Image: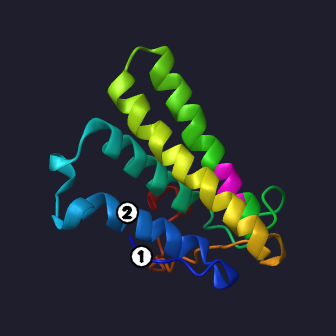
Amino acid sequence: METVDYAQFDFGKRLQAYMHEVFNHSGVTRTEAELTDGQRVFLKALKREMLKYVDVNRSGYPNNQLEQMESFTRTIGDLHNSYFDNGMHKVSDCLFNRWRMLFEECKKLAAAGAANQPCWIDKIEVEHSDMPLFFDA
């Protein structure tokens, strides 16, 4: 695991680093098919989180990088609770460990002043088309 500079925190790069950690756990490169169920659930949550912040004109919660990390931490916590309630304890244990790691990172971010850093937004370039909007998927 790499060291994180919380004073110059970049939420998007950190999400990418989490993906790298999942695919390269213990120094062994894995494919998505080789991941455990818990790792797959965490990976899907990461991908959904990255897509959440692609609209430059998005307004409302969250307003800064600390709130983004707190929101993602709550998402993982909610996933843990759902899998635990459904009796899928191996998946919920994996998600709990990830939630605990994220919770600790939130505390470090708060101490480093991430509440003053603007919200991270990923700008996705799309190919322009003459097709009507509903054809562009």
Q: Determine whether, in the image, residue 135 is placed left or right of residue 10.
A: left
Q: Which mark is residue 2?
A: 1
Q: Give the range drawn in magenta.
A: 68-72
Instruction: Please tell me whether mark 2 sits on a helix, a strand or a loop.
Output: helix
The type of residue carrying mark 1 is: Glu
Residue at 45%, 56% (x, y): give it. Answer: 47
89 left or right, relative to 61: left
1 or 73: nearer the viewer = 1
Residue 129, horizontal then vertical, whole percent: 46, 76
User: Where's the N terminus, which quadrant?
Assistant: bottom left
Give amino acid for label 2: Met
Q: Nearer the viewer, residue 97 or 35?
A: 97
Give neighbour class at mark 2: few <14, some 14-19, many 20+ (Cα, 10 Å).
some
> How would you classify the magenta stretch by its main secondary structure?
helix
Q: Nearer the viewer, residue 70 or 136?
A: 70
The CA distance from mark 2 to mark 1 is 13 Å
Give the image location of residue 137, x and y in percent. 43, 58
Point 68% across, 66% down: residue: 108
Residue 77 shown left or right of residue 38 in the figure: right
Q: Earlier in the sequence, mark 2 or mark 1?
A: 1
Is residue 114 visible in this depiction of the protein? no
Q: Is 117 placed above or below 108 here?
A: below
- Alpha-carbon neighbours of circle 1 within 10 Å: few (<14), some, or many (≥20)? few
Which label sits on residue 19?
2
